[in-house]
Image (cartoon, grey):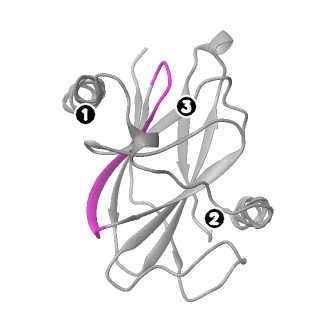
Amino acid sequence: MKSSILAISLFLVNSVICFGQNIESAPDDKAVVYFVIKTLTGADDLYYFDSKKIIGKCRGKNYFRYECEAGEHVFFAKANYPDFIEADIEAGKIYFVEVQSSNAFTGGSVYLFPLDPNKNPKRLDKIFKFMEKKPPKSFTKEDLVIDNEDKVIGEILNEYWEWKTS
């Protein structure tokens, strides 16, 4: 089964608007991406990446905040089958990605859905209510280490490039 690639720009939410106490404004020189996991993801952590860097890991219903440089990014999450988002993001803006996963019985896939506040206001409202219930998950450097990290990331990126160029 091939990975799906969403070759789209993430939709932004103006960082001036305050949606809840757990959503901080983006710094003027960085972009912020919130990854919101609203489905149970099984017993194992799902790892999240920005190109060649691990940026987070979560299990179950959770979310995390990722600050990054403006510009082009390839975000992906890895289950049995990874999913990718290509994004050109702007400094000072906040972006939201809803993460849905299926368990190992249905193939162990993960799906990343960028949220457009103009097209999905009700879905975004649910995300904000979910985020108000607890602070974002945070990570130490030790939390974001996996065995054979370079090999794992390389294999996933090879799959991405193969799909993209086919």
Query: Is residue 94 located in the magenta-colored stretch of the structure?
Result: no
Find disc 3 in the rendering and name its residue.
Answer: 110
Q: Which mark is residue 164?
A: 1
Q: Nearer the viewer, mark 2 or mark 3?
A: 3
In this picture, which residue range is highlighted in magenta?
A: 69-81
The amino acid at mark 2 is: Lys
Nearer to me, 150 or 86: 150
Q: What secondary structure is found at the residue carrying circle 2? A: loop
User: Image point 28% across, 45% down: which residue?
Assistant: 51
Q: Is residue 35 above or below residue 152?
A: below
In the rendered image, residue 31, in percent from the top left (x then y), is placed at 39, 72
Comes first in the chain, label 1 or label 2: 2
Q: Are marks 2 and 3 in contact (CB under 8 Å)?
A: no
Position of residue 142 in the picture relative to residue 160 (left or right): right
Find disc 2 in the rendering and name its residue.
Answer: 119
In the rendered image, residue 156, in percent from the top left (x then y), is placed at 30, 27
